Amino acid sequence: MKKLGTETAFEVLAKAKALEKQGKDVVHLEIGEPDFDTPKNIKEAAVKALYSGYTHYTPSAGIPELREAIAEHISKTRRIEVDPEEVVVTPGAKPIMFFSILACVNPGEEVLYLNPSYPIYESVINFVDAKPVPIPLLEKNDFRLDPEYVKENITEKTKMIILNSPENPTGGVLTKEDLKTIADCISNRDDVIVLSDEIYSRILYEGEHESIASLPGMKEKTIILDGFSKTYAMTGWRLGYGVMRKDLAQKIAQLMTNSNSCTNAFVQMAGVEALKGPQDEPARMVAEFKKRREIIVSGLNNIKGITCKKPRGAFYAFPNITGTGMDCRKLSDYLLNEAGVAVLPGTSFGRYGEGYLRLSFANSIENIKKALERISNALEKL
């Protein structure tokens, strides 16, 4: 258990809530969840399913209706043929992360993963006694990977490569050329699998989403991780899925049987409605996130000691704070206690996050402006 990490976002949230109990006003820019309500048609579908008897066990891999809807959705959006038997539904997308590493990686093997990135990747790699091999995402490269670095660090022990695009925490996006580099590196390696975390695929501000699974020969080598939390503001519903070759899907379903039994039945029916129903609300959310992106990036760049690149996807700003002279953890603590603004230190996402903060702009424009003013005033005091 000592090898298992955590998510700093929840630790910072707990500190912020404690300060609020003491009467301090806090602007929350630490948690990565949409501040919108779940669309009405999805909630109505869940209620209808409840009263229609969807209150019992389902197959561990998910109900056929949802697996079919997901297969159709992925086939269309990733331009590949997906069979419902290649889909496993889980309570949230995070179990796909956990189960994939458990199923595919042995002790002593190596896993390449982006850094800075979602902290659970490294946590679970360590948990299974594998070796985490970070791929640095550097600001000078627009937070994209360095192809030469990837080539040099794929060894005989490499078993998995974990990708995330659009990326948390940087907001960076991997290009088709980036993905081709990785595909070329493992084209002759049947023992290496890619876990492609595409949970933010619908929250993209320029261009189209690119999946490594869409490249020739890569579908069989890729596990696509996706879900409903970010796109449909369904974080508390806990509904996600993985798309992978059938033999692996059977193993992941077996892990589901041994852990959760199945995913909530009426929530799965809500997922069918999410995919097949109107898509106006997700589009409206992305348009609103884009407005907020302009405000937060512009505001951060106007604060002395801070510079910020414009994120291309997700809903996070990842400003460079080296000009303040403080390390990121001390600065995040200072901003919470002095300014009443909850943010995350970049090192919460790995060692290459030093010198940065992550600010979620999944909050109102009013609160974002308030936070920017508070950060500016707090830094002036330094």
Image: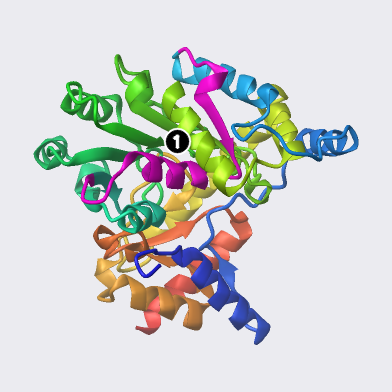
* Amino acid type, label 1: Glu
Instruction: Tell me which corner region of the image, top left, top right, bottom left or bottom right, holds residue 210.
Output: top left
Residue at (40%, 67%) from the top-left corner? 1
From the viewer's side, name the closer residue of 258 and 136.
258
- Above or below, 167 relative to 342: above
In the rendering, at what x and y percent does residue 319 appear?
35, 58
Residue at (30%, 32%) from the top-left corner? 193
- Above or below, 33 relative to 245: below
Badge 1 element: loop
Q: Is residue 103 magenta?
A: yes
User: What residue span does the magenta drawing correspond to?
Assistant: 81-110
In the rendering, at what x and y percent does residue 88 appear?
55, 31
From the viewer's side, name the closer residue of 347 and 271.
271
Give neighbour class at mark 1: few <14, some 14-19, many 20+ (Cα, 10 Å).
many
Q: Quadrant of the C terminus?
A: bottom left
- Where is mark 1, residue-wise? 198
